[in-house]
Amino acid sequence: MGVIHPEISIIADANSLSRAAAKLIVRQIGEQLQRKEYFAIALSGGSTPKSLFNLLAKEPAFNTQVPWDKIHFFWGDERHVPPDHPESNYRMANDTMLSKLPIPQENIHRVMSENSDADSAATQYEQELYAFFHLTKGQMPRFDCILLGMGPDGHTASLFPETSALLEKERLVIANWVEKFESYRITMTAPVFNNADCVIFMVSGEKKAETLQAVLQGEKQPYHFPAQLIQPAHGRLLWIIDRAAARNLNVQVGE
């Protein structure tokens, strides 16, 4: 993993994993808002963060500690589907969390994935990042927190193995053709993820154990295991993993 040493927490099960992530995020929000006016987070899709979003929305121990009007929500990637589609990452987050909290609509920065032209949707989202973070050409946004997952094939966000997005060094957002789905995915690029203050991977389930060992402790093969591309330049890299996913790891890490 180069000079970056990921912080690995092995948690009992998927429910405990979500609770650990919720505590961490709420603590980060409190710390960052002592220094700045807003907190920018990029959410992930998939099944693992769903229970996290539910916790943040429903449990007073978490949601009463957060000034929701100061939190800005983005997405690390999105399916090329309308926002009301069952596969939409935005819809999942909105149904489970965003619609249940007092979040100003202007703080929700979704991908306009209903655009029939995926490249155009990616460019539009890139411009949203340039505007929000007041960037000039060549600069990268600085997210306070980015949530990521990892698929059994080692993909993260919509950076899939052996796809063109893995080679991107300059763009912030790209439309990535994924052959096995015969569709485009709109995804932030590795340089964006690597410029964050904190990247949190949430990984759950035995079916990911073999790949997780390869990603964290195997040979560096980012073209085959894109999760290995995530190497924050100056931020923290945290892996919160349940015991089922961690069963092949050669580490002694407590909860």
Image (cartoon, grey):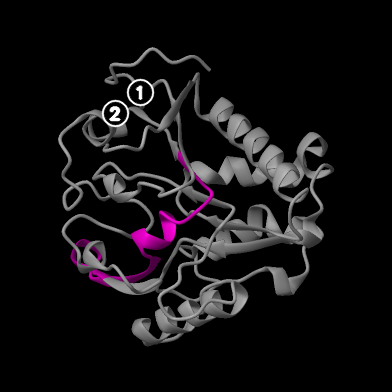
The answer to the question of whether label 1 and label 2 lie on touching residues, with beta carbons closer than 8 A, is yes
Mark 1 to mark 2 CA distance (whole Å)? 6 Å
Judge from the rendering whether residue 61 lies leftward or rightward of residue 109; answer left or right. Answer: right
**Residue at 74%, 72% in the rendered image:** 105
The amino acid type found where label 2 is placed reads Ala
Instruction: Tell me if residue 10 comes above or below residue 70 in the rendering.
Output: above
Q: Position of residue 163 (x, y in %)?
A: 19, 64
Q: Say what secondary structure mark 2 lies in.
A: helix
The amino acid type found where label 1 is placed reads Ala
Which residues fall within the magenta stretch? Answer: 177-201
Any part of residue 181 in sight: yes
**Residue at 76%, 60% in the rendered image:** 37
Q: Does 172 lie within the magenta span?
A: no
Q: Say what secondary structure mark 1 lies in.
A: loop
Q: Nearer the viewer, residue 236 or 126?
A: 236
The disc label shown at residue 246, or none: 1
Q: Quadrant of residue 246?
A: top left
In the rendered image, which quarter contains the N terminus? top left
Q: Earlier in the sequence, mark 1 or mark 2?
A: 2
**Residue at 50%, 49% in the rendered image:** 147
Q: Does 195 lie within the magenta span?
A: yes
Q: Position of residue 250 (x, y in %)?
A: 28, 16
**Residue at 29%, 20% in the rendered image:** 249
Q: Position of residue 112 (x, y in %)?
A: 51, 79
Q: Position of residue 181 (x, y in %)?
A: 25, 64
Q: Nearer the viewer, residue 51 or 251?
A: 251
Circle 2 residue = 209
